[in-house]
Amino acid sequence: MFVSSLKPDQQIFGDLSSVAAFLPIGNISFDNYAAVFDRVPAARFLINSIGISAITVLLGILVNSLAAFALSRMSMRGKSIILTLIIATLIVPFETLALPLVWWVNQLPSLTLDGFSLGFSKGWIDTYQVQIIPFIANAFSIYLFHQYFESIPKELDEAARMDGAGWFRIYRQVVMPLSGPAVATVAILTFLPAWNSYLWPLMVVQTEELRPVMVGVQYFFQLNVSWGEVMAYASLITLPVVALFIAFQRSFVNSIASSGVKG
């Protein structure tokens, strides 16, 4: 993909029958990357996706870890049933929820700013929050946090409570500092679907200035298709994902190992 993004279309198709398709040889340049920014507002799409994904990750870590903490550390009746119901939601495909969800978000109030006065309007369609809030809570993230919290000795909670700590302080100062690998894994697994979101923004966002990067892909298949530009755009939107995984890969592997192996 990256090598093809450096070549003109004629050379891309000409090199397909040989190993040259994988080598940066021939007429190599960054013209396709310059053309990407001329053809679509790629910088705006990137900023939108980075902001949407970052906020979704931060709020997702907070909400899902709090839910998992309550299910793992606090005493309550029916915890296993609640956890089972949460995990059961994983079998429901998003496509079956999309249309009802569009109706619901269109009924919610939205804060508006008119000059120096605040007001309310109906509906979240064509906003940033409609791309963030429905995806904060995640069943798999809750399950992953729960499994990791279970591996942390509960004697630490008892010691903290003897020192006068409440549940939120135990969560903030005892459990979460020991859960770095789980946080990194949830960050990656939350970031990926937020970054790759295509169907949902296509349904609820009409304004170009609010669209994420994946919706921008369709711009390149209107009128004349330039495959070099397609490869350049695909390379651009892949870089943040690769950078995130490289930054957290050790914690990601540690979390998977510690969540899947007991004893």
Image (cartoon, grey):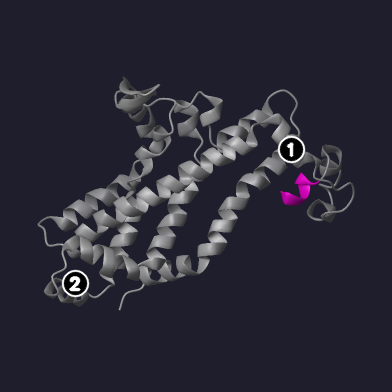
Q: Residues within 10 Å of mark 2 (few under 14, many from 20)?
A: many
**Disc 1/disc 2 C-alpha distance (Å):** 55 Å
Residue at (21, 60) in percent of width and height: 168
Q: Is residue 103 left or right of residue 157?
A: right
Q: Which residue is mark 1?
A: 229
Q: Does residue 227 lie above or below 179 as drawn?
A: above
Residue 228 seen in render: no
Main secondary structure of the magenta stretch: helix
Q: Please report the bounds of the magenta region as a residue range.
A: 1-6
Image quarter for residue 242?
Answer: bottom right
Residue type, numbered disc 1: Glu
Determine which of the numbered discs, if any, sits on residue 157 in the image: 2
Q: Does residue 132 lie above or below 224 as drawn?
A: below
Q: Is residue 146 left or right of residue 183?
A: left
Q: Using the image as rendered, state which of residue 177 and residue 87 is in the foreground.
A: 177
Tell me the element at label 2: helix
Tell me the element at label 1: helix
Residue 6 seen in render: yes
